[in-house]
Image: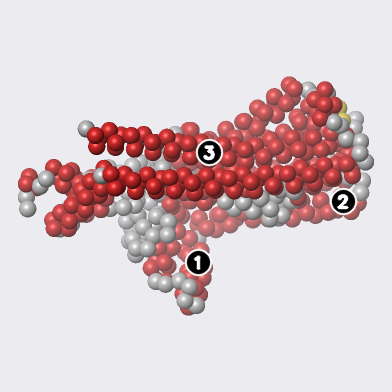
Amino acid sequence: MKEQNRPESAAQAAESEPKAALPESEADAPMAENPAPEPSAPEPGVSVGAKGAPGAEAPPAAWGAEDSAVPKVAAEVLSAGISAQKEAQVSPAGEAAAEDGQASDRKKQSRKNLIAFLVSAVIIGCVVFALIQLSNTLQQGDSATFAELLEGMNWWYILIVAGLALLMFATDSLKYVVLTRCYGNKLKISKCMKVALIGKYYDNITPTASGGQPMQIYYFYRNGISGAQGSSITFMKYGVQMLAVGIVCVLLLACGVGTLQGMLENEAMHNTILICGWIGFGINAIIPFFVAFVVFCPRAVSWVINLFVKLLHKIKIVKHADKIEGKIRAWLDRFAEFSQFIVKHPKVFFQLLLLCFFEPVLQYLIPYFLLVAMIGPEVMGMHGWELLFTVAVLACYATNAAVFIPTPGNSGAIETVFMLAFTAVASSVLFWYVLVWRFVLYYVYIVLGIGMNIFDVGIKFRDSRRARRAVSEKNRS
């Protein structure tokens, strides 16, 4: 059959055939069942230089030679299938099926949002109740009421706290701007802000902060960034972030040993927070080395993972172990290639490191300004830099001491340790001080994350209504 004798719809489908015939690399698509691609095949949309570094997007024509090899008969069959699919989409039966599917998706998403909201509300309620009881015990009932707190509040310092929290979120969003543009993917700043919020939200509602990176990778994938690239972005950001956190924390922990001892008169409490703080720091300090190992030794990591795959294959849990091993090896090679590209470009790496330093610094500045807002510029004879250093040391020890508690966002543990560390400093406003501090750095992201999910459901509902209206108008015409 000649090209000019094809129906118009089939010709249009044939023109779009190369895009449909060549999906994204199997090494990038999560949980694909097809065999692994050749390791030397470049990623669609990303050119590879002489050194293997990803660069600008490759022209779509780069894949034309491979697509032209498809037999004409297969092309006609594929074109007919696509045309039939398009006709089914505009038919009443197809419209009804699509509407039912969208309604089902909206119900599932709404159910997930409701469950997340209820779980978060229960966690927050239990933590607040425990804080009230602990505060009354530590202060022997001499706690300020909410009205007394508002009466003595310095609202200018509260504005500074809010500004620092916004600056922390802005710098976190800029990290993803730097990394995505480094890979040649110019993701909008608004979407990078959403990536940052997704990471904060799912980190805060999952045990040991394990849910943020997978959801960020999924969001990248939906926005045209491959699985290997998305994993590299989140992994490198996390590794460099923990490197910056480790540098700041080791300085505060080492220089503040005497300060901690002076603030905690109870020897048992002092020893517990001191030891747990250093243990938590040690756990966090391992992360940058682990990231470096995965980036620069991908074959060793692949060998360990494939050993586990073979074990599962022997006990009949996993089928086609050879295909899975090949896919893992290819994926890790591509992941390492992208990640090494960042490390081999010092300018990009130090831009990312500088942005990562903002988070720990601001995280320990916020408790200081919050304390000054509630109590005043002088506490226990300390003011200025002395008070700032004392608050930063106590906050650093309290934060690190609760790292290994496997609750969502270390909830319950971190508030308890923080309250014990600041008993002498925060005096009668201890409960309100810990509650507001935790809200600024933790609870606010849960509230914003729930709002983000509700907004996304509303957008999907609006778009589906517009699509149904457009299809109905087209059928009537």
Q: Indicate the secondary structure of the residue bearing disc 1.
A: helix
Which of the two discs, 3 and 1, sits closer to the camera? 3
Choose the circle earlier in sequence order: 3 or 2.
Answer: 2
Quarter of image, res 28 = bottom left
Whole-number angstrom distance, CA of label 3 to CA of label 2: 43 Å
For image coordinates 38% across by 36% down, the residue present is 465
Where residue 358 is drawn, which disc sits there? Answer: none
Q: Whole-percent x and y of residue 70? A: 18, 57
Q: Amino acid at mark 3?
A: Ile
Which residue is denoted by mark 1 in the rendering?
305
Can residue 86 be seen here? The reply is no
Q: Which residue is mark 2?
A: 269
Q: Amino acid at mark 1?
A: Ile
Are dots 1 and 2 in contact, CB under 8 Å?
no
Residue tagged 3? 454
Earlier-in-chain disc, 1 versus 2: 2
